[in-house]
Image (tube, rainbow, N blue to C red):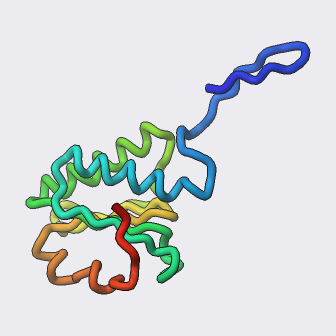
Amino acid sequence: MKKITTTKTTKTIRTKTKAPAAPDIGLWLVKLCREAAEDKKAEDIVVLDMRKVSTLADYLMICSGGSEPHVRTIADEIVYQAREQGVRPKSRDGSPKSRWMVVDYGDVMIHVMHPELREHYALESLWGDAKRVK
């Protein structure tokens, strides 16, 4: 909450999100998502800066979960941590049974995949021109 003082009164204004102002919001959000995935032991987390290679999203994060429940847990934790900061996904697709879940935040796209599917589809290679974010 922010307090604003005017000449006569003090007002408290609730802010919807704890995110920084644009243009840093995409980088802030992808780092938050990476930390959430790390908290749930996601494997081989890769973040790509897509701004110069695609209009799909500013950042693409790909990570692996070793089983169906692990894939679901990682995706759920990412959504939970972002919601705690006031950010809600635009969409969420896939299911643990498919072993691939996608969380779309507009500027940030998250793929949580089983290692076999990740190797098969090789999204990192598909976007090989994108710079990796550390």
| Apparent side of residue 82 relative to residue 96 in the rendered image (left or right) | right
On the question of residue 125 being in view, the answer is yes
| Apparent side of residue 65 relative to residue 105 in the rendered image (left or right) | left
Total number of numbered discs in the rendering: 0
Q: Could you say which quadrant of the image residue 24 lies in?
A: bottom right
* Residue placed furthest toward the front: 134
- Picture layout, residue 104 above or below residue 29: below
Q: Could you say which quadrant of the image residue 63 lies in?
A: bottom left
Image x and y of residue 126, in percent = 31, 86
Q: Residue at x 9, y 59 (%)?
A: 67
Q: Residue at x 19, y 60 (%)?
A: 96
Q: Residue at x 43, y 42 (%)?
A: 83
Q: Could you say which quadrant of the image residue 14 lies in?
A: top right
On the question of residue 93 being in view, the answer is no
* Residue placed furthest toward the right: 7
- Picture layout, residue 114 above or below residue 89: below
Q: Quadrant of the N terminus?
A: top right
| Apparent side of residue 79 relative to residue 96 in the rendered image (left or right) | right
Q: Quadrant of the C terminus?
A: bottom left
Image x and y of residue 124, in percent = 28, 78
- Picture layout, residue 94 above or below residue 32: below
Q: Residue at x 47, y 57 (%)?
A: 27
Which one is in front, 129 or 97? 129
Image x and y of residue 64, in percent = 18, 63
- Picture layout, residue 45 above or below residue 12: below
Image x and y of residue 55, in percent = 53, 78
